[in-house]
Image (tube, rainbow, N blue to C red):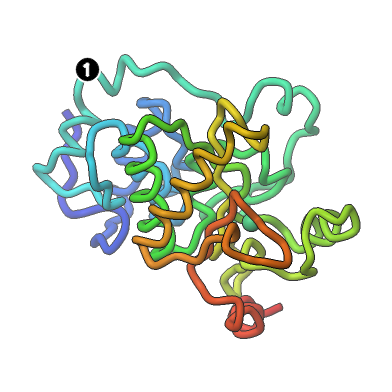
Amino acid sequence: MAPVSASVGQGGINRSDDVRKVQQLLKQAGADPGPIDGIAGPRTIGAILGFQQRFLTRPDGRVDPGGRTIARLNGPAARAAPRRPTLPAPARAATPPPPARAVGGDWTGDSQRWSQDKKLASLQPGFRTRIVEVIRQLKAEGFRPTIVFGWRSVAKQQELFRRGVTKVRFSFHNAQTPQGIPNAWAVDLVDERWAWNEPDCHRFFKALGRIGKTQGLVWGGDWVSFRDWAHLQGRQNSELAAVKRESGL
Ligand SMILES: [Zn+2]
């Protein structure tokens, strides 16, 4: 039994030895907190949220002393959970070893191939809390939501622009902290059974738009000139220039 002395994660006290313990336990439970470095960065918080989705209806990204999450992390169910690789096997085989890890997480590589936990971790924290709730409600309705893109690099955005997949050279998916840490204000979600295959996908997208809007989010399916069915964002289109400035871009 490894207790923590104070809260770890979103809004927590985050003493480094506690954070390190939680990171170790998350890893044993098959979640992906990034390096065991004692820093409660977005990737560790994303892993806590991902782990909590297994048993909490409202994940909060925080591990409190004596709380349910630490009990689960120490429980036999967590230890018995299958170890999930960070990346799907084909992607790993095709991708050369990444360069040295940045502090707080390794944000290199194709963000479309990141794990679901890591994609969640790449979202702006307040936006992420709302997306976790959207995913919970979609699952409760029997859908199988999966994140295609959380954050993506400006270089990837340019590539999608050239291919005509997007109409903008900078998007809410590209938002980052001034230090260059992913801090996306947009996410693309599909049902893993249908993706963009007509007509079934639209049952999912309708639910996505409906639930997203109850969380105060903007749904791309409402846009007239370019319907972006899978897309939810946490800011208004008119704020794009401001988000670009906040990102130091
Ligand atoms: Zn999008």
Estimate the x, y position of residue 107 in percent, counting from the top left: 63, 51
Q: Is residue 75 above or below residue 186?
A: above
Q: Nearer the viewer, residue 60 or 23?
A: 60
Left or right, 3 with respect to 47, comes to left
The quadrant of the image that shows the N terminus is: top left
On the question of residue 35 being in view, the answer is no
- Label 1 secondary element: helix
Residue plotted at (48% across, 64% down) = 124
Q: How many marks?
A: 1
Pick the front one: 16 or 155: 155
Instruction: Determine which residue is flagged by label 1.
Output: 76
Q: Quadrant of ligand 1?
A: bottom right
The residue that appears at 46% across and 31% down in the rendered structure is 144
Q: Nearer the viewer, residue 104 or 56?
A: 56
| Up-down relation of residue 12 to residue 110 (above or below) | below
Residue 153: x and y in percent read 72, 58
Q: Is residue 53 left or right of residue 27?
A: left
Neighbourhood count class around disc 1 (C-alpha, 10 Å): few under 14, some 14–19, many 20 upward: few
Question: Eyeballing the image, is 231 above or below 30?
Answer: below
Q: Quadrant of residue 182 in the image?
A: bottom right
Q: Is residue 132 above or below residue 213?
A: above
Quadrant of the frame with the C terminus: bottom right
The three-letter code of the residue at mark 1 reads: Pro
